[in-house]
Amino acid sequence: MTDQPTSGAERTLGGNEEALAKLRTLRGSIDNLDAALVHLLAERFKCTQEVGELKAAHDLPPADPAREADQIDRLRRLAADARLDPAFAEKFLNFIIDEVVRHHRAIAARQDGTTEE
Ligand SMILES: O=C(O)C(=O)C[C@]1(C(=O)O)C=C[C@@H](O)C=C1
C-alpha cells in the first residue's frame, strides 16, 4: 500500500506506484542534501563572522575583490569538473559573498558606534 499523495506531482502520478516510489526516494535525497547545505552554510557564516570581526578590529575593508576573483576562478573550475554550470556556481558564490560583505559592514559600523541598516 502507498501512503497518501502529499503534493501536486504525487497526485498526478496517482496509481503509478513505481514512479511515485522513485519520486519519493529522490525527494528524500533532496531533503537530505538541502539540510546538508544549510549546515554547511551555517558553518561558513560562523567563519565569515569571525573574519568580519578581525577585519573591523584591524580597519580592513569589508570586501577583498582580489580574494573574490581567486575564489570565483577556483569555484568555476571545480564546478566544471563536477559537471555543474560554472556560471551558476559563480552566481551562487557572489550571492553568498554579497551577504557576507553586508554583515562585515554592519560589524564595522557597530564598532565605529555608527548605525548602518
Ligand atoms: O576572505 C575574506 O576576506 C572574507 O571576508 C570572506 C569572503 C567570503 O565570504 O569568502 C567575503 C568577502 C570578501 O570580499 C572575500 C571573501
Image (cartoon, rainbow, N blue to C red):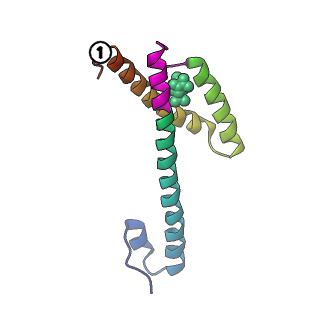
Image height of 14 relative to 53, above or below: below
The residue under label 1 is which amino acid type?
Gly
Segment tinted magenta in the rendering: 48-64
| Residue sitting nearer the eye, 30 or 9 | 30
Is residue 106 rendered to the left or right of residue 47? left
Q: Quadrant of the C terminus?
A: top left
Q: In the picture, which quadrant includes the N terminus?
A: bottom left
Q: Residues within 10 Å of mark 1 (few under 14, many from 20)?
A: few
Residue hosting label 1: 113
Q: Nearer the viewer, residue 112 or 35?
A: 112
Q: Is residue 18 left or right of residue 49?
A: right
Indicate the position of residue 110 as horizontal and vertical percent values: 33, 20
Would you place residue 73 above or below residue 30 in this image? above
Closer to us: 37 or 86: 37
* Residue at x 42%, y 24% (from the top left corner): 104
Name the outermost residue toward the bottom: 1
Q: Residue at x 37, y 70 (%)?
A: 6
Q: Is residue 21 magenta?
A: no
| Residue 23 point in image, percent of width and height | 51, 69
Q: Position of residue 102 (x, y in %)?
A: 40, 25
> Element at badge 1?
loop
Give the percent coordinates (x, y) of residue 29: 54, 62
The quarter of the displayed image where residue 53 is located: top left
Identify whether 103 is placed above or below 6.
above
Q: Residue at x 51, y 38 (%)?
A: 44
Q: Is residue 56 magenta?
A: yes
- Please tell me how many numbered marks the rendered image carries: 1
Task: Name the residue: 54% across, 18% down.
Answer: 64
* Placement of 64 over or under 15, stated as above or below: above
